[in-house]
Amino acid sequence: AAVVTHEGRHFLQIPGPTNVPDRVLRAMSAPTIDHRGPEFAALTTEVLDAVKPVFGTTGPVVIYPASGTGAWEAALVNTLSPGDRVLIGETGHFSTLWAGLAAKHGLRVDVIPGDWRRGVDPAAVRERLDADAGHEIAAVCVVHNETSTGVTSRVPEVRAAIDAAAHPALLLVDTISSLASIDYRHDEWGVDVTVAGSQKGLMLPPGLGFNAVSRKALDHRGSLTSAYFDWDPILESNARGFFPYTPATNLLYGLREACAMLAEEGLPAVFARHQRHATATRAAVRAWGLEVLCLDEREYSGSLTAVLLPSGHNADEVRRVVLERFDMSLGSGLGKLAGTVFRIGHLGHFNDLSLAGTLSGVQMGLQLAGVPIKPGGVEVALEHLRDAG
Ligand code: PLP
């Protein structure tokens, strides 16, 4: 097997896991401590407080040693009962996976079909809820930022649709690739469970899953069961600074540091930075003469851009060339988008010159893979970055 060498930093430009800042890596390299001791209790309290503003909540945030999939499952098993109906907008690969997970738990899944180029249609949510006079739909599930397509659904408008239908369904939102990258407000937007993961906007390695939980969700407990994911013993234990199992101590050190970094920059600046990079990326894609997958400008993702290749060209070949020649990983097309799109992750620990390097690698990779592009995409992006600073 070939030995992989890195002559400089690898460019990890998939849309998560993202590049982990040196500060976070250093914070995590501290010795693991007794998870039942006083030092740990102080860490728990600090981290549970620091993470709340990132979700835009003053309520509890449950932290699991789990990937995002575990946090998805936790949101469902804590709030729903077997046979409950859940309504989910088909936005792409991840909404489809979440729907499949719900079905495995014996939930009846109503899908609002989509073409994987748009977000959840709030009018369609309203229509489905209006038709549900018996209030059988127990939850509306939305993937805020669909990582497979680079489309951000309009959560406040979905909330407004639920309210307009005067429907009691819970609103469960997956922010796995939007939290700490794209404006998000758990409390203000009336979200009941926000699902998140550590490995994207939070700039940590994979391994932590999150549920931010509303009062309504705490009061509306379903009868699906999971001993491990059950919020109650965790919240009870958290109140004393602990967890009912062995937590991921070193990832919590990292989370404390990442929250400090986000607070130092300020969330509005974090969101603006991501928007700037997303806008510059789309400008480059268009200057190359290529198409952005997202069709609705209200729904462009701030954290990643999915680029559609002209027919007859394979996106995986572009990714292969970029990795081999420039040591940069780009995201593949997932599910039915395999081979037709590649995804540029521009989220997390990322600045203007990281984007300049990323787009340079993409431009050269497209040319080397024989994709017909117009020159100058990188220059257009640089002009945007220069003038938008
Ligand atoms: N939801 C979204 C939007 C995602 O992007 C991902 C992973 O990329 C997941 C869910 C699943 O999370 P995990 O792979 O951490 O289990």
Image: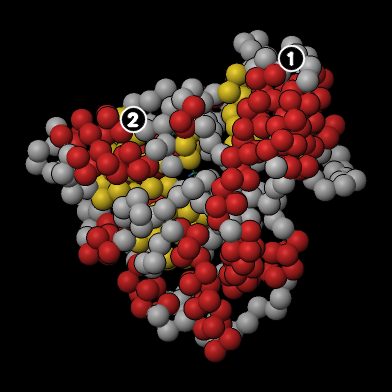
List x then y, in percent, for residue 147: 53, 38
Q: Residue at x 60, y 69 (%)?
A: 256
Q: Quadrant of residue 59?
A: bottom left
Q: Is residue 329 visible?
A: no
> In which quarter of the view is residue 224 placed?
bottom left
Name the residue beneath numbered marker 2.
121
Q: Position of residue 83 (x, y in %)?
A: 20, 46
Q: Vertically, is 143 above or below 41?
A: above
User: Which image quadrant for residue 25?
Assistant: bottom right
Viewer-nearest residue: 180 or 386: 386
Q: Is residue 375 above or below residue 379?
A: above
User: Closest to the observer: 386 or 198?
Assistant: 386
Q: Is residue 266 left or right of residue 137?
A: right
Q: Is residue 20 left or right of residue 149?
A: right
Residue at screen point 67% across, 32% down? 280
Q: Position of residue 100 (x, y in %)?
A: 37, 39
First in sequence, mark 1 or 2: give its number: 2
**Other residues around mark 1 within 10 Å, as few (<14) / some (14–19) / many (≥20):** some
